[in-house]
Image (tube, grey):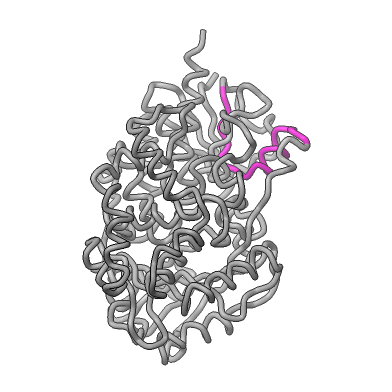
Amino acid sequence: MLDAVVVGAGPNGLTAAVELARRGFSVALFEARDSVGGGARTEELTLPGFRHDPCSAAHPLGINSPAFRALPLERYGLRWLHAELPMAHPFPDGSAAVLARSVAETAASFGPRDAGTYRRLVEPFLPKWDTLARDFMSLPTTALPRDPVTLARFGLAGLPPATLLLRRFREERARTLFAGLVAHVMAPLSGFATGAVGLVFALAAHARGWPVAQGGSQAVSDALAAYLKDLGGAIHTDYEVKRLDDLPPARSYVFDTSPTALARIAGFGTYYQGYRYGPGVFKVDYALDGPVPWTAPEARRAGTVQIGADSAEIGAALRAAAREGRAPGRPFMITVQPGVADPSRAPEGKQVFWAYAHVPNGWTGDLTEVMERQLERFAPGFRDRVLARATAGPAELAARNANYVGGDIGTGAVTGLQALLRPKLSLFPYATPHPAVFICSSATPPGPGVHGMSGHNAAKAVWRRLRQP
């Protein structure tokens, strides 16, 4: 009998399997698709030689993840590559604010009226970032805080809505960039703990940047899988699990799936019926005949570029998708240009480009024209560079990754108490009604992102059970 069976080979499932195998437990992992990856994959979606990331592309939480940093992933081929700027936020007038590795450079891009405010906001946390990240991304039930005072100070700054935090800034440049940081989790700016989201992304950039993985996001998953195999773990692909009886006997079962799928497979009935899914996204992957023609020079040097004219436009786009049930006319967009750091992703002189906008959960329309019209505001002539495009709305994204219910790439709304207490109001979120069944997906704390911490935290709960006599 195996000690643990893991279902789902996304970053969290792979990390959970690795953590258990590292501690001497026998582990087998089962994945429905023909390769590992989940939200960290790389495929030729458009033209030969253009390597796209269908899901996540830039990895601020990956390089800063306490779980990944404790594993020898570089030995298995993972290399982080950095653009000169982690992120830029261009404006219609051709200027830009930036999120640079340097706090001073970032503050200077906001202008003199907000430079000091920004420095006072982030600088107290930077010297203790590694400890704060570990405390923030764990739970008291899995690891006691190492620095509870700093964590409490962070909570005071971050738990209120981002709309309150934005009021600290006097100019629109700082407010717009920070609103864009919050929008990465597709939560309205007025939501609980949204200030913490913006702070985490900013601190992550200053600490270690927002890199891409050399060769594509698949490198993250492949490194985890190779390490798991070296530890003696088994990986089975093309193996869809429809019920627990489809799996071999084991002392524990760990699911990197949505709560909805877990309830169906394990027969939990309505146990997760109160769990809410958030807005979906409409994503376009481009093969380009050269770099994006950004008007702002800073955007040409950045790995990630946020698109939104001002904080009001960003807030309106978020409300439209999350609360009003419609696609925004001027969407907030997150774009990634991996070739700025990794030219190997496309033939010489060409580029891959990744962009998505928020839409209502399950939306069935086509947002391509609206997105490209928005891009043209900040990069005139963009359409002239397009060689090919691959579009994916909520239905297509859910077909690629079953955890993206209704196109929700966060596997659950990051709003209200569910921002912190997910998938149930419980101190033991990785446990389920069955004592031998656990959940480790992004539906559990700390939530969305390619960081493996949900898998890491769940593995702790599993091995504590396995060590019980």
> Residue at position x 36%, y 53% from top?
219
Can you give x and y, in whole percent of width and height, for residue 116 in the image? Answer: 27, 63
> Residue at position x 40%, y 63% from top?
168
Q: Is residue 212 magenta?
A: no
Vertical relation: 377 (above or below) 230: below
Q: Quadrant of residue 94?
A: bottom left
> Residue at position x 60%, y 27% from top?
248
Vertical relation: 352 (above or below) 140: below
Q: Is residue 344 left or right of residue 443?
A: left
Q: Quadrant of residue 138?
A: top left
Can you give x and y, in whole percent of width and height, for residue 353 in the image? Answer: 41, 74
User: What residue span does the magenta drawing correspond to?
Assistant: 252-269
Q: Nearer the viewer, residue 157 or 375?
A: 157
Indicate the quadrant containing the N terminus: top left, top right, bottom left or bottom right: top right
User: Could one spot residue 26 in this view of the protein?
Assistant: yes
Q: Nearer the viewer, residue 440 or 170?
A: 170
Can you give x and y, in whole percent of width and height, for residue 338 in the image? Answer: 34, 68
Q: Residue furthest right?
A: 269
Can you give x and y, in whole percent of width and height, for residue 157 in the image? Answer: 42, 49
> Residue at position x 23%, y 45% from top?
127
